[in-house]
Amino acid sequence: MTEAAAKPSVLFVCVHNAGRSQMAAAYLRTLAEDRIVVRSAGSAPAEQVNPAAVEAMAEEGIDMSAEQPKVLTTDAVRESDVVITMGCGDTCPIYPGKRYEDWELEDPAGQGVDAVRPIRDEIKARIQSLIADLLPSA
C-alpha cells in the first residue's frame, strides 16, 4: 500500500464550489497537515471562488486566492472515502460503500464577509470533528 493509499480521502461538494466546499477543503488541508487527501467540486461550478469566502479565510491565515471552482466528476466521488455534500441536493452521485454526510450550512453566495464569518466558523468546527474522527491518533 502506498502512503497516499493509506491516507483517508474526503470530497466536499456544493453547487458552485465557490464558498462552503472551498472553505471546508482549505481548512481540512491546513488543519490535517497533509494527512488527509482533500478534494472539492461543484455540480455547476462558478466562474470564481466567492471573494467574501476568500477574505474570511484570509482572516484565519488561510490563502484561497488561487483556488478555482472545479466540476464534480464521478471519478472524484469514486476515489474518495468520505463525501460531504453542502446543499447540492439530488445532483450529487451516490456510490455504495461511501461514507456520506450532508452538512446543512447557509449559502454564502452573494453575501458580504460579515455574513460569511459565522458560516466559516461552523465549517471549522465541523472540520475539527471530522479530523478527530478520521485521524483518531491525532
Image (cartoon, grey):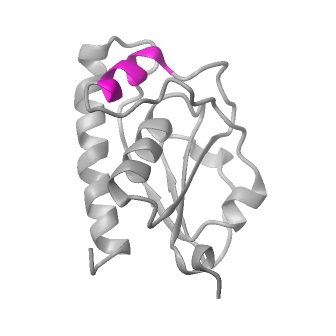
Q: Nearer the viewer, residue 59 or 112?
A: 59
The stretch in magenta equals 50-58
Image location of residue 36, percent across then percent down: 47, 65
Image location of residue 131, percent across then percent down: 33, 65
In the picture, residue 35 is in which quadrant? bottom left
Count of numbered circles on the image: 0
Q: Nearer the viewer, residue 94 or 137?
A: 137
2 vs 84, left or right, is: right
In the picture, residue 24 is in which quadrant? top left
In the depicted structure, whether residue 93 falls above or below residue 54: below
**Residue 129 shown in magenta:** no
> Could you tell me which residue is drawn at 32 percent across and 73 percent down?
133
Image location of residue 48, percent across then percent down: 61, 20
46 vs 73, left or right, is: left
34 vs 118, left or right, is: right
> Could you tell me which residue is drawn at 46 percent across and 19 percent down?
109
In the depicted structure, whether residue 89 falls above or below residue 136: above
Q: Which quadrant, please, contains the C terminus?
A: bottom left
Q: Main secondary structure of the magenta part?
A: helix
**Residue 56 shown in magenta:** yes
Image location of residue 15, percent across then percent down: 59, 35
> Could you tell me which residue is drawn at 77 percent across and 60 percent down?
75
In the depicted structure, whether residue 129 falls above or below residue 121: below
Residue furthest to the bottom: 1
Q: Which quadrant, please, contains the N terminus?
A: bottom right
In the depicted structure, whether residue 82 falls above or below residue 28: below
In the picture, residue 119 is in which quadrant? top left
Q: Nearer the viewer, residue 83 or 104?
A: 83
